[in-house]
Amino acid sequence: MTASTQERTVAVLQGLDKVTARISEFNAELGVPVTFGTLEITVQACHKKPPEEPPESTAFIEIREKQRGEPVKLLFSGWMFASTPGLSALEHPVYDVWVLDCAIWQENSESNG
């Protein structure tokens, strides 16, 4: 048996449901849609500056709203910045979403060999 590690870049996001005041932190793998309430969030790119530079994580994000009986609506498509979440933000009456970090997610798997 051998163990292998798969590394994937993920964006660490945080979402606020303004109705319940509940804050959720979740990971979004690049190119894989994640659901937060009625929102479908897809992170296309995530970059983190090296440790010797001022800290900054940026992510290119597309956010769509999926409501029952209505067509899917694109609400946001652009770069979000962890250090200045208000600079490029989703404007929605119920939800706020912002970037916290970019990280490497490691999954260990064992295979027979």
Image: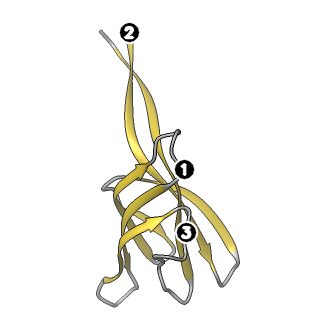
Give the image location of residue 39, x and y in percent.
44, 75
Q: Amino acid at mark 2?
A: Met
| Numbered disc 2: secondary structure | loop
Which disc, if any, is residue 84? 3
Q: What residue sits right under mark 2 in the picture?
A: 1
- Residue drawn at (37%, 30%) of the image: 6
Task: Please identify, in this view, whether the residue under mark 2 or under mark 1 is nearer the observer.
Answer: 1
Decide which of tag 2 and tag 3 comes sooner along the chain: 2
Q: Is residue 61 above or below residue 51?
A: below
Q: Which callout, 1 or 3, points to the residue nearer the camera?
A: 1
Q: CA distance from mark 2 to mark 1?
A: 43 Å
Q: Residues within 10 Å of mark 3 (few under 14, many from 20)?
A: some
- For the N terminus, give its image quadrant: top left
In the image, 18: left or right of 72? Answer: right
53 up-or-down from 31: above or below = above
Marker disc for residue 54? 1
Mark sitting on residue 14: none
Which amino acid lies under the numbered mark 3 shown in the image of this protein?
Answer: Thr
